[in-house]
Amino acid sequence: MGNVSWWKKMCAVFVLSAATAIAGQAQTFTSLFGFDGANGASPESSLVQGIDGSLYGTTSSGGLNNEGTVFKITPEGILKTLHSFVGTDGAAPQGALVQGADGNFYGTTGLGGNEHCAFGAGGCGTVFRITPDGELTTLAQICLKRGCTDGAYPSSALILASDGNFYGTTSQGGFNGGGIVYRITPRGTLTTVYEFCGLGRCPDPPVGGIIQASDGNLYGTTAGGEFTIAIVFKLTLTLESALTTLHTFDTADVGSPAAGLVQGTDGNFYGTTSENPESDGTVFGITPEGTLRTLHTFGPWGFTPLAALVQGTDGNFYGTTGNGLGTVFSVTPKHAFTTLHRFHGPDGSNLYGGLLQATNGKFYGTTMAGGADSDGTIFSLDMGLGPFVTFVRNPARVGQQFGILGQGFTGTTVVSLNGVSASFTVKSDTFIEATVPAGATTGYVTVTTPSGTLTSNVPFHVIP
């Protein structure tokens, strides 16, 4: 079900298992794992860190039935396949997983499920829950309604919003056929939040999923096309969700988005556009009011960003390019751009997923192809950044629980949110459960451990 790259068709290559330092730089690149088909193939999404400190992800093909897998891998590179899809429970998962407040992971498959969906045989996708031990439950089959008015092909990741529900997008379906934004409860109740029009000069389809920003609203992008327009949008979470267009792209000049957004610590949003006749895409920043600026223009060198950015603890943005063999890059908010690693095939190629900065400070990612069996790889990039803490569930309201991920938590004495002490329970050496305290305002979370104080990589947003 997954995509097969030209590299995979050409030849099998030897995996680059040794760490390679880039001359003149402090970073170290390491190939951690190479897929072989039986344990998965063609990972197309970013990784996510679990409460046990392991990293979790999906492959879009491979596994026992060649329908894709869910896996976990330790930061040292030991991989375990948690689930192989069979088609009826989903196929071709392309979006990243998200960890719920219950410690389980939630995700989507772009195909599989209902065999007789309105758009053809093979299924139009599913939403699932999987435990850290690999027990999978199908929460919803997409496109059960006549005409796929409930959406079709949910290939992007879910988000866990402040209301305790998950939100995602489909690339097709809805009454107008242009895709939808949907809400799904942890128990599987599916509701359409917004439908894109799909006709004329309209914004569709949504790409790369959505994020919930510090103001509590949802933000995302649409791809655009010959008869549609590419935009950055804001969507309210009210019962009658209203969409606001923040920016309309001139695709002839800068291309159109191929991924979602990330909110920076400055409150602005950052994203990427794909190729156009003049270049291979851009990195851009946009204010909540819609003022856009270009941070970097690619090429034309055959490198195109296809995944969302991530902001590192050094304040810089990190991303990947997918065309050619692919690269990892960084760009500062003041436009300074650096290529950190160029892939060569043995160490991976064709990056469709973005990066994760784990709480040990290192970045982790996947390649869709390359490696010894040409089935993709998992890699790490150490930029010399120190450990920190991050969250399960952000933003949240006063009184709501949220999770803190990190390391060395045993013996923790204080957890503070922007200087206000929070009640907490140390669940393990890598996970703390805390409650947003009364009087807390948006700010950084600090955790005082026996070995020192850890600070969050981003502010925790307390919403009304």
Image: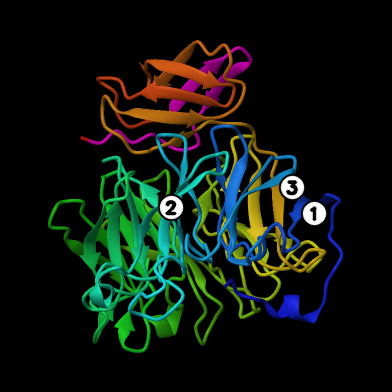
Q: Residue at x 75, y 80 (%)?
A: 9
Measuring from the top left, give residue 265's x and y in whole percent: 42, 43
Mark positioned earlier in the residue sequence (1 or 3): 1
Tag 2: residue type?
Phe
Marks 3 and 2 sit apart, C-alpha to C-alpha, by: 37 Å
Circle 3: is it few (<14), some (14-19), or many (20+) Cα within 10 Å?
A: some
Tag 1: residue type?
Ile
Location of residue 60 by image quarter: bottom right
Residue underneath mark 2: 128
Measuring from the top left, give residue 375's x and y in whole percent: 72, 66
Image height of 355 relative to 398, above or below: below
| Rendered-image quadrant of the C terminus | top left
- Is 132 displayed left or right of 39 in the figure? left
- Is residue 446 in the magenta section? yes
**Residue 27, label in figure:** 3
Between label 3 and label 2, give the one nearer the viewer.
Answer: 2
Q: Is residue 338 visible?
A: no
Residue underneath mark 1: 22
Mark positioned earlier in the residue sequence (3 or 2): 3
Tell me where the magenta segment starts and ends, as one range: 445-463
Q: Does the residue at mark 1 contact the one at mark 3 (Cβ under 8 Å)?
A: yes
**Residue 352, label in figure:** none
